[in-house]
Image: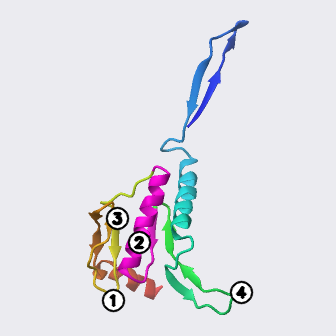
Amino acid sequence: MVHISGLLFMYYCISDPFDISTEVLQGDVLAPFLFIIVVDYLLNKSTHEIDSGIVTHQRQSRRHPAKVLNDLDFTDDIALLKSTLPRAQVQLTRIAVAAEDVGLIISIPKTEYMTSNCDPDPTLQVYGSPTMCQTSNTWDPWWHLAQVT
């Protein structure tokens, strides 16, 4: 929020000073852009200097390190990509802590996870509350559509 003091000059008279405050409001055209910048900062901060994600290209040499995909983002939806549930829990906790540092919280009812080729227990938790595990059958139509196109 920005606080500015202003004066009004009218009919050769100057008014008393008054406060003007501005902030980014929901519906503001700048809000989505600022939100994406903050989310990108949170994801970079939470994955900095840790070995996590899915390796897309193996390490070739010291000058060509492995390429790792940690997350996929689209507007306010984020998919974290981890190889094990414990790594996913660590990453989710790190993001929650980073979000709190800038005044954001993760919505527990909207947080879901899906596993592939592993047991979904224990459930992932945010702020000590369990999150919803989606079965792979939920995404079968999407996977089929992705293979056709």
Quick one: SS at disc 2? helix
Percent coordinates x, y for residue 125 in the rendering: 31, 67
Q: Main secondary structure of the magenta part?
A: helix
Q: Compared to 92, does 35 lie above or below?
A: above
Q: Give the Cα separation between the discs numbered 2 and 3.
A: 15 Å
Q: Give the amino acid type for the residue marked by disc 4 in the picture.
A: Arg
Q: Which residue is mark 3?
A: 111
Quick one: SS at disc 3? loop
Region rendered in magenta: 77-103
Q: How is the image coloured?
A: rainbow
Question: For the N terminus, which image quadrant?
Answer: top right
Lower sequence index among marks 1 and 4: 4
Q: Give the Cα separation between the discs numbered 2 and 4.
A: 28 Å
- Residue displayed at 55% across by 64% down: 45
| Camera-nearest residue between 102 and 147 | 102
Q: Compared to 30, does 22 lie above or below?
A: above
Question: Which mark, residue 90?
Answer: 2
Question: Which mark, residue 117?
Answer: 1
Lower sequence index among marks 2 and 4: 4
* Residue 66 appears left or right of 71: right
Contact check, label 1 and label 3, Cβ < 8 Å: no
Percent coordinates x, y for residue 134 in the rendering: 29, 75
Q: Give the Cα separation between the discs numbered 3 and 4.
A: 38 Å
Lower sequence index among marks 3 and 4: 4
Q: Give the amino acid type for the residue marked by disc 1 in the picture.
A: Asn
- Residue displayed at 48% across by 59% down: 98
Q: Residue furthest front?
A: 49
- Residue displayed at 52% across by 60% down: 39
Question: Which mark, residue 63?
Answer: 4
